[in-house]
């Protein structure tokens, strides 16, 4: 049997001289055409985003991934604090005053759905707490949040937010990563990828989880996705410091130092052998940061130096144990920002067993009890944190974002005691560097059911936050799987009306 007979039909065609010469000729012609078009400037330009802009990919040195980098343009905000409330806070019971709910209490006007996320809907329900005018602006805020209500003159509310999903995991993903699916970088990862951090002895991005545990989407809320591993959030809280920080008692400080020096030399040699391996460089940088954290983290977590008046203002003592733990987390957040950490994400709520209003704000039943439980934990410490930051001048260069994944319905569920998920309208607020104060943007309808005036998507919300950090959401990209990926996908517009 000849060699040609042992080949497949496709293999024999490849040996055909006419086919070979024809393919070679076409290939050569294509190369020649490309060369001529390039010479005449008729080929496509360099990489462009979907909006036609040239992408800005930060020049990240793998050996120093956390080195500070310049923003795309100057804005007051240099750091950002995200206060995230998993479970969906009811906007119609907190910040979005709808007198029609009181007028129509117990009725079911036409046009409202018969079935929502968890089943049949009930009748319109007035707010479970009275709304009262607060501050010089007279902003209507419910009695559920009396401490935050006193600060409304510093807040910029967005009342016409909408989202693409009514499920908690996807809602958390969407708000925190820009996509409902998993595997995408979180907001904090994008910011630290773009800007690095000033403090080289603490993580660039810290996620302070609720004392009760992680939120529904877990570490995806502060993960790095396809960005280099160095930009994932480091999660710890006032109760649970990072693991393995303490030196074993059998190891002297001198021996520990010599070990670190040896590791540094070995790592440097390894990097010389593989200079283009960003993952290797990221791992080495993470280990080196971990070594520095052995001294920096215990210092920042030590609340012994906080005054009695500060501890009282935050509500560390005198309330529930959970409020005390969350209050300590709030103090930790302030101390991290003081040390120059670029992004701090503070969680109020977790989801170890489904939430159901007990561990987060997901109040499908007995909202009067469950929302009150979460508010007792969140209200005073959060308000004290914002007041403390303002007094210390941190608000001059820190943007604060208070957010949740969607809202709740203006009518009750069939059980008559809870409100279902509402992706059509919800409220978040901004405060601090770069935003207007005592300002409300957008409106939901008379029931708080749908956003109707200046409707704002999650893409718009994230685009605006990036803009306030001096970053162009259309140009901040990372090339992944053939696409210039970005936090806002191919959507989003900056809400300029909220900028100071």
Image (tube, grey):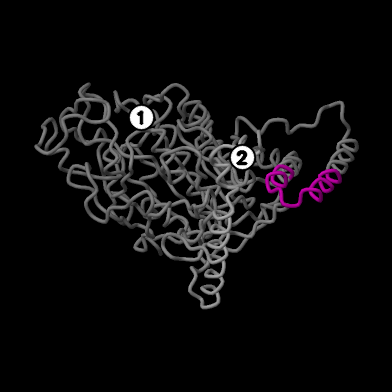
Asked if the stretch drawn in magenta spans residue 283, the answer is yes
Which of the two discs, 2 and 1, labels the residue nearer the N terminus?
Answer: 2
Q: Is residue 91 visible?
A: yes
Please say if 446 is above or below 422: below
Relative to residue 361, is residue 160 drawn left or right? Answer: left
Residue nearest the viewer, comparing 291 with 34: 34
Most extreme residue toward the front is 1
Q: Quadrant of the C terminus?
A: bottom left
Tell me where the magenta segment starts and ends, as one range. Answer: 264-284
Determine which residue is flagged by label 2. 234
- Judging from the image, what secondary structure is the residue with disc 2 in? strand
- Neighbourhood count class around disc 2 (C-alpha, 10 Å): few under 14, some 14–19, many 20 upward: some
Q: Quadrant of the N terminus?
A: top right
Q: Residue at x 49, y 28 (%)?
A: 322
Please say if 285 is above or below 106: below
Residue nearest the viewer, comparing 188 with 241: 188
Q: Residue at x 35, y 57 (%)?
A: 438
Q: How many marks?
A: 2
Relative to residue 68, is residue 159 drawn left or right? Answer: left
How much space separates mark 2 and mark 1, taking CA atoms? 26 Å
Determine which residue is flagged by label 1. 362
């Amino acid at each position: 049997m000849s060699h040609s007979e042992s080949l497949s039909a496709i293999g024999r065609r490849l040996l055909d001289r006419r086919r070979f010469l024809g393919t070679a000729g076409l290939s050569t012609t294509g190369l020649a055409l490309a060369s001529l078009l390039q010479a005449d400037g008729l080929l496509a330009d360099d990489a462009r985003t979907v909006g036609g802009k040239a992408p800005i990919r930060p020049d990240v040195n793998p050996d120093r991934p956390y080195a500070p980098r310049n923003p795309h343009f100057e804005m007051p905000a240099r750091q950002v604090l995200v206060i995230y409330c998993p479970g969906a806070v009811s906007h119609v019971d907190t910040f979005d005053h709808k007198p029609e709910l009181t007028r129509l209490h117990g009725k079911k006007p036409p046009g409202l759905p018969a079935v929502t996320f968890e089943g049949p809907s009930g009748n319109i329900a007035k707010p479970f707490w009275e709304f009262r005018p607060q501050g010089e602006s007279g902003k209507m805020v419910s009695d559920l949040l009396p401490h935050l209500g006193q600060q409304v003159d510093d807040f910029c509310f967005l009342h016409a937010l909408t989202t693409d999903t009514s499920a908690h995991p996807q809602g958390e993903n969407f708000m925190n990563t820009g996509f409902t699916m998993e595997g995408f970088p979180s907001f904090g990862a994008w910011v630290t990828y773009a800007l690095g951090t000033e403090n080289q002895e603490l993580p660039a991005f810290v996620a302070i989880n609720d004392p009760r545990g992680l939120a529904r989407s877990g570490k995806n809320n502060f993960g790095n996705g396809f960005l280099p591993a160095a930009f994932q959030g480091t999660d710890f809280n006032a109760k649970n410091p990072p693991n393995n920080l303490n030196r074993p008692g059998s190891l002297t400080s001198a021996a520990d130092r010599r070990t670190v020096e040896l590791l540094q030399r070995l790592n440097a040699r390894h990097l010389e052998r593989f200079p283009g391996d960003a993952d290797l460089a990221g791992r080495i940088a993470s280990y080196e940061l971990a070594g520095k954290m052995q001294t920096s983290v215990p210092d920042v977590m030590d609340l012994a130096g906080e005054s009695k008046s500060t501890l009282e203002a935050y509500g560390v003592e005198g309330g529930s144990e959970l409020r005390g733990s969350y209050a300590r987390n709030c103090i930790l957040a302030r101390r991290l920002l003081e040390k120059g950490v670029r992004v701090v994400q503070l969680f109020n709520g977790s989801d170890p067993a489904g939430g159901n209003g007990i561990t987060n704000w997901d109040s499908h039943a007995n909202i009067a009890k469950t929302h009150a439980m979460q508010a007792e934990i969140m209200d005073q410490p959060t308000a004290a944190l914002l007041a403390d930051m303002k007094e210390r001048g941190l608000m001059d260069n820190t943007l604060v974002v208070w957010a949740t994944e969607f809202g709740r319905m203006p009518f009750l569920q069939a059980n008559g005691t809870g409100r279902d998920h509402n992706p059509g309208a919800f409220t978040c607020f901004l405060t601090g560097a770069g935003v207007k104060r005592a300002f409300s943007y957008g409106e939901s309808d008379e029931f708080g059911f749908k956003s109707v005036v200046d409707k704002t998507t999650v893409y718009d919300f994230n685009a605006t936050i990036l803009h306030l950090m001096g970053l162009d959401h259309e140009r901040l990209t990372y090339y992944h799987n053939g696409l210039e990926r970005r936090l806002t996908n191919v959507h989003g517009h900056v809400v300029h009306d909220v900028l100071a």
